[in-house]
Image (tube, helix red, strand yellow):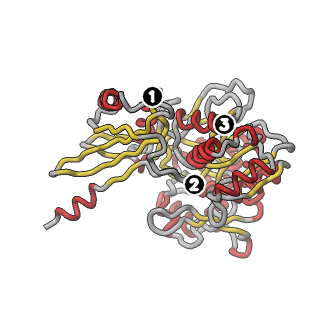
Amino acid sequence: MRRIQDDGLRWTVLHAYARCPQYRAKFASAGIDPCAVRGLEDLESLPFTTAEDLREGFPLPLLSVPETSVVRVHASSGTTGKRKILAYTQKDVDTFALQMARCFELAGLSAQDRVQIAVGYGLWTAGAGFQFGCEQFGALAVPVGAGNLEIHLQMLTDLGSTCLCSTASMALLMGEEVQRNNLADRIRLRKVIFGSEGSSRKMRRAFERALGIDESFDIGGMTEMYGPGTSIECREHEGLHYWADLFVIEILDPDTLKPVPAGEVGEMVVTSLCKEASPLIRYRTRDLSRLIPTPCTCGCSMPRHDRLLGRSDDMIIFRGVNVYPGQITDILHDFPELGSEYHICLNREEGRDTMLLQVERAAGGGSDGDAQLASRVARAMHSKVLVSAGVEIVNPGALPRSFSKSRRVTDTREIYNREAQP
């Protein structure tokens, strides 16, 4: 593996320098001689690539092949500014399908499985990635896409889909619809592969129970690195195996950009090893996780990272305290009286920041103890996250559901600041 990574890094650096003006300028500014890069021991000397580099190079950033070699583009969701558009050669497309096929294999699927795809198609990588990976793996793809609950329920019952690929939010919504329509005895689902958003263990157990499945698998991915399928849990569920022959992961302190001690949490920084059209060199993903240094009991030799704990740029600063949504989900997991869905409302009242945490009560629970439960959650928030928040317990199903990623935070403090300006 070390030889593959050394060879891949040397190839990537020389390829990017020779063919991409953006990278050539970066190397020149950093005083890097690409021919002097020998392997991983030189990785830390290379300059970083950021989302700004992708936006500055719009519409085909970091392009390192002739445009005639580009056979496809995909784009990120573009929630801020212009979308990040990534180009693919045919080899890139094949590698994308390969990493997804590996994920299906590691999740224990076979050619007899019927895989229902409930993620977005079009510019987004998710739908195409799951479908082409499924077809390369040899299973039957059922490409329904996001939304379309009625069609999804029909396909589950009529085609007997055995695996669902979706976000955790979509899986929860599907499970609630299966229960509402009394379809639990008519579907054949055994597995769910979910990703694209942060989710709690409680949310995971909720959709597993509602869908009556054997197990679920957290999958990693990003548009910048082909799309979904960069990593996935094995059946031991002890972290996510990532394809170290296709890219290298560093875990760095997001402030100092220096490596953190082994096993500690930091920002994931990735470097591609064989990406042709838009190679990535030390790309700052902003995702927070840690590497798991011990071998996995499943026997797979591919290394692992932990589940994503949030994003360094999703951090909430509340009264001077840094808060990550992942910390909230960990607290709520300790309260069996609560469901998995929550929402954080940040506001400013009379010049003072306020936080309201709305949490759904677990299904079947009564409201008599809501006040006491809210008080216990508030104390846990203060003890473990060091913030004082109001807590409101709401009925099951009261918070909005989503076909894709759930929006967990509403922050109106900036609006207050603008209105307060003279």
In front: 192, or 398?
398
Q: Please tell me whether residue 182 is drawn above or below residue 215 in the rendered image.
A: below
- Badge 1: residue crowd in 10 Å (few <14, some 14–19, many ≥20): some
Name the quadrant containing residue 93. bottom right
- Circle 1 or circle 2, nearest the eye: 1
Disc 3 versus disc 1: distance between alpha carbons?
Answer: 23 Å
Tell me, yes or no, whether the two marked residues, 1 and 2, touch with CB atoms within 8 Å.
no
Badge 3 marks a residue whose secondary structure is: strand
Left or right: 246 as drawn, with respect to 255: right
Q: Which residue is mark 2?
A: 403
Badge 2 marks a residue whose secondary structure is: loop
Q: Which mark is residue 216?
A: 3
Residue shown at 74%/43% (left/top)?
163
Residue shown at 43%/46% (left/top)?
312
> Residue 126 placed where, x, y %?
65, 56
Left or right: 228 as drawn, with respect to 284: right
Q: Amino acid at mark 2?
A: Phe
Q: Which residue is mark 1?
A: 337
Tell me, yes or no, whether the two marked residues, 2 and 3, touch with CB atoms within 8 Å.
no
How many badges with numbers are in the image? Answer: 3
Badge 1 marks a residue whose secondary structure is: loop
Q: Residue furthest left?
A: 422
- Badge 3: residue crowd in 10 Å (few <14, some 14–19, many ≥20): many
Q: Visible in this render: residue 226?
A: no
Tell me, yes or no, whether the two marked residues, 3 and 1, touch with CB atoms within 8 Å.
no
